[in-house]
Image (cartoon, grey):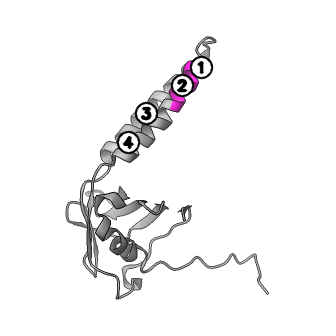
Amino acid sequence: QRHFLPGARSIPFHTFMAGAPSVRYPVRRSPFLAKALGLVWLAGFLALAWAWPVPSWRWGLGAAVLLLAGSAALRFWLGTAEGEFRWDGGAWHAPGKVPLSDAPVVRFDGDRWLLVQVRVAGPGAGPASQWLWLEAAADPPAWPALRRALFAGAVPEPASEGIVHE
């Protein structure tokens, strides 16, 4: 079961179930994510190379966009946090033992992979977002406990007010 949660929202800490287990989970840069980002970039490069016999301003624009996308993907991958993601039964802690200012938000659930957005207290005016790519392979025995803790307070979205079920 894989689904994307575009409308995911933060859940206040007090709504987490009391039974959510304490868990420590290793976070590292994912070779899988690096390969996936690389394959997407390679597809763009091959499409651009296929158009090479007819260079124009569009080809130049495509090359610039491809370079920017590649550098953004590399920056994203290098910027993913490493360390330990922890739920102690009362609060979440980001890698680096930084307490979170809000509950983590699961942005992608691929069953064996999770993309989680966390907001840590930043040096500026507001909290800064950090992205964690979590994989079951990092610690298979702790994976179910991590998923239980992340989803323990999840509440289904209310039905749209425009739709009436009778």
Residue at the location (54% across, 25% down)?
46
Q: Earlier in the sequence, mark 1 or mark 4?
A: 4
- Label of residue 34 in the image: 4
Q: Earlier in the sequence, mark 3 or mark 1?
A: 1
Say what amino acid the circle numbered 4 marks: Ala
Say what amino acid the circle numbered 3 marks: Gly
Q: Main secondary structure of the magenta part?
A: helix
Q: Earlier in the sequence, mark 4 or mark 2?
A: 4
Pinpoint residue 13: horizontal percent, then vertical percent. 37, 80
Callout 2 crowding tier (Cα within 10 Å): few <14, some 14–19, many ≥20: few
Given contact means CB atoms under 8 Å apart, are the residues at marks 2 and 1 in contact? yes
The residue indicated by pointer 1 is 50
Measure how far apart labels 2 and 1 are at the Cα level.
Answer: 6 Å
Q: In the figure, 26 relative to 91: above or below?
A: above
Callout 3 crowding tier (Cα within 10 Å): few <14, some 14–19, many ≥20: some
Local secondary structure at mark 2: helix
Measure how far apart labels 4 and 2 are at the Cα level.
Answer: 18 Å
Local secondary structure at mark 4: helix
Q: Which residues are magenta?
A: 43-49
- Label of residue 46 in the image: 2
The residue indicated by pointer 3 is 70
> Residue 112 versus residue 54: which sits nearer the camera?
112
The image quadrant that residue 137 belongs to is: bottom left
Pinpoint residue 37: horizontal percent, then vertical percent. 44, 40
- Residue 65 shows in this picture: no
